[in-house]
């Protein structure tokens, strides 16, 4: 493991005023998102769409890196440049999603465990050879009346730690993503408790597996009310509860925290990140974004696989990236 290289990459991923573009939707997920906006799900549409994203003029001013999916990292832009090289040439660090998805946890109805550890070492070496410099693994924790169980939290934390250790062995920065889902009618307080238990377990396992915190990035969900909660907490409450939770659980040496948007509205996700950075100074780690839906939704809706819409769709991505870049320094004005 080369800690200096890992640390330099991790720091570049969370550089001031920049965040990550998650464009690593698996084939079933992108198919669903395309369908919603009436785009036909073909290899060519997926490739063209992803080229549109990474070729957005000026994107590198606010986007430090982008997370690719296995299909995309093997593809090339229309001029024949492999995606990872195309991105690196523009100052956007290529990363890769390496988990194989959240599957039902046997014996625990309603709960998931993320798969993908088998042969992961070999896959990481291959991705590194293709130009990837970081990886992502997403665990999913669902809030319900009797869940999450400690077994679900511990199984996911254990898998995240084994994944992170393998990444560092391959000199790839692990993005460790334990997502507490926003789905449900739970309160902010309940989300706080579940997030606290989850992050405690995750960092216990990471330490147990000798993961170097300075060479990793935490991809966190915000502490937020459930989407169907009768009364949802306001922006400042979300910002303060999220920081309280992180400060109680995340070691100061972690290179940075990049939030997922998780089904929040586009502006809502930006406002929450901004409030955290505006209200909380001198934090041990930079707080930024690693959004998929909150960056891409307007782009996909506008593009609709029509080349005539491409330039305007890119402007929408540029705009959201710029707003989130501002939020990463607490200087976003609604
Ligand atoms: P969202 O921002 O749409 O939650 O996606 C982030 C992500 O990469 C989930 O793994």
Image (cartoon, helix red, strand yellow):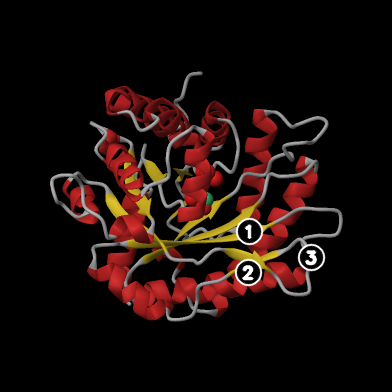
Does the Cβ of the disc 1 residue fall within 8 Å of ligand 1?
no
- Where residue 287 sits in the image (x, y, percent)? 48, 44
Residue 99 sits above or below residue 323 on the image: below
Which residue is the site of mark 1? Answer: 140
Query: Residue placed at 28% from the left, 35% from the top?
Result: 59
Task: Assign a secondary structure to mark 2.
Answer: helix
| Disc with the residue nearer the chain's start (2 vs 3) | 3
| Disc with the residue nearer the chain's start (2 vs 1) | 1
Kindly tell me whether residue 26 is visible in this rendering: no
Q: Name the front one of labels 2 and 3.
A: 3
Query: Residue placed at 60% from the left, 39% from the top?
Result: 263
Residue 64 sits above or below residue 106 on the image: above
Mark pair 2, 1: CA separation: 8 Å
Which residue is the site of mark 2? Answer: 156
Q: Nearer the viewer, residue 39 or 22?
A: 39
* Numbered marks: total: 3
Mark pair 2, 3: CA separation: 15 Å
Kindly tell me whether residue 20 is visible in this rendering: yes
Which residue is the site of mark 3? Answer: 109
Q: Name the front one of labels 3 and 1.
A: 3
Q: Quadrant of the N terminus?
A: bottom left
**CB under 8 Å between discs 2 and 1:** yes
Mark pair 3, 1: CA separation: 14 Å
Residue 197 horizontal side relative to residue 230, left or right: left
Label 1, residues with CA under 10 Å away: few <14, some 14-19, many ≥20: many
| Disc with the residue nearer the chain's start (3 vs 1) | 3
- Where residue 212 sits in the image (x, y, percent)? 44, 71
Query: Residue placed at 32% from the left, 71% from the top?
Result: 171
- Where residue 122 sits in the image (x, y, percent)? 35, 80
Tell me where residue 154 sits by quadrant.
bottom right
Tell me where residue 238 sits by quadrant.
top right
């Amino acid at each position: 493991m080369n800690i200096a290289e890992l640390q330099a990459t991790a720091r570049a991923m969370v550089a001031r005023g920049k965040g990550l573009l998650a464009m690593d939707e698996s084939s079933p997920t992108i198919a669903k998102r395309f369908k919603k906006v009436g785009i036909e799900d073909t290899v060519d549409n997926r490739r063209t769409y992803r080229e549109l994203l990474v070729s957005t003029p000026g994107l590198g001013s606010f986007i430090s890196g982008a997370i690719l999916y296995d299909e995309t990292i093997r593809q090339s832009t229309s001029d024949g440049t492999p995606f990872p090289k195309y991105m690196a040439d523009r100052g956007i660090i290529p990363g890769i999603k390496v988990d194989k998805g959240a599957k039902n946890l046997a014996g625990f109805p309603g709960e998931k465990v993320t798969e993908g550890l088998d042969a992961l070492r070999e896959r990481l070496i291959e991705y590194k050879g293709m130009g990837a410099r970081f990886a992502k693994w997403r665990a999913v924790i669902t809030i319900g009346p009797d869940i999450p169980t400690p077994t679900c939290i511990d199984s996911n934390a254990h898998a995240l730690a084994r994944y992170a250790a393998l990444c560092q062995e391959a000199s790839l920065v692990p993005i460790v993503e334990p997502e507490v889902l926003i789905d449900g009618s739970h309160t902010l307080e309940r989300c706080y408790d579940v997030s606290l238990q989850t992050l405690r377990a995750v960092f216990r396992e990471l330490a147990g597996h000798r993961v170097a915190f300075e060479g990793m990035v935490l991809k966190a969900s915000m502490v937020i009310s459930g989407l169907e909660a009768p009364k949802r907490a306001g922006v400042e409450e979300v910002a303060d509860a999220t920081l309280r939770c992180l400060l109680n659980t995340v070691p100061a040496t972690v290179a940075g925290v990049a939030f997922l948007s998780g089904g929040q509205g586009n502006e809502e996700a930006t406002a929450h990140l901004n409030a955290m950075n505006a209200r909380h100074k001198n934090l041990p780690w930079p707080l930024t974004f690693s959004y998929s839906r909150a960056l891409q939704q307007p782009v996909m809706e506008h593009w609709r696989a029509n080349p005539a819409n491409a330039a305007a769709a890119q402007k929408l991505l540029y705009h959201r990236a710029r707003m989130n870049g501002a939020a990463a320094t607490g200087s976003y004005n609604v």
